[in-house]
Image (tube, rainbow, N blue to C red):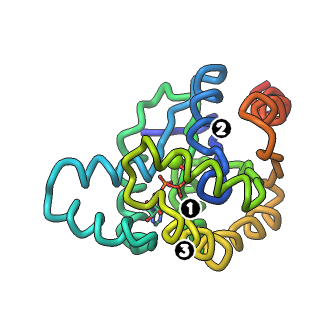
Amino acid sequence: MLGTGKLNIILGGAPGSGKGTLSDLIVKKYGLQHLSTGDVLRAEIASGSELGREINDIISLGNLVPDAQMIKLLENYLNGVPADCRGVIFDGFPRTVEQARALTIMLASRQMDAYMLDLFAEEDVIMTRLIRRGQTSGRADDNYETIKKRLKIYNDTTKPISDYYVKLHKYFMINSNINPECTFAQIDVILSQLYK
Ligand code: ATP
Ligand code: MG
């Protein structure tokens, strides 16, 4: 189980803002463990379970999986993180203020907290990236109508968590419009200070 002295990163940002790509780059340099809730949910779908079928109905419409289910998933994940782990990148969680509050409590009970790095990209950039990804990803939610819906849910429901971390003094804004290298360079400056 995770203990004191870990440094955890929440990668925020809209769908297509680059969370998965940047997670890989951060893992390479800082050796953190990467949790992508989207990947975990897609693995459940691929397993063909009844739960996977329910999740597929939600995700393919671009909707969010209920908070209670996601919080339980996180609790299980945190219980399985090895003791020598330097920290975790949370990619895709929290997505609601309720999830953010629950994460604070789950981390505090393990003597930990987390910093949010919020990736910003303009809507036209995001749309181009996700439509292109849809041509090869096979993801049911990477099509124009569903992307529009996911962006609306992001703006209405997920964006307010930025303010939650601003108020905790644990918030960094990152420009993710240009390319992965430029985005990583900004993150590297921050992490090299936090991981001193
Ligand atoms: P990105 O393109 O940056 O990877 P994304 O929004 O396209 O982000 P995922 O993070 O892979 O994609 O999530 C895919 C879907 O899984 C979401 O649209 C949502 O339905 C579901 N999901 C993932 N994480 C959560 C969460 N924390 N709460 C609720 N639903 C979630
Ligand atoms: Mg992703």
Cβ at disc 2 under 8 Å from ligand 1: no
Under mark 1, the amino acid is Pro
**Image mark for residue 94:** 1
**Image coords of residue 57 (percent x, y):** 29, 71
Q: Are the residues flagged by discs 2 and 3 in contact, CB closer than 8 Å?
A: no
Give the CA distance from mark 2 to mark 1.
Answer: 16 Å
Mark 2 Cα-neighbour bin, 10 Å: few <14, some 14–19, many ≥20? some
Q: What element carries label 2?
A: loop
Decide which of tag 3 and tag 1 comes sooner along the chain: 1
**Image coords of residue 194 (percent x, y):** 79, 34
The residue under the point 79% across, 46% down is 177
Mark 3 Cα-neighbour bin, 10 Å: few <14, some 14–19, many ≥20? some
Is residue 38 left or right of 113 when viewed as pictured?
left
Give the residue pinned by disc 2.
7
Is residue 27 left or right of 174 when viewed as pictured?
left
Under mark 3, the amino acid is Lys
**Image mark for residue 149:** 3
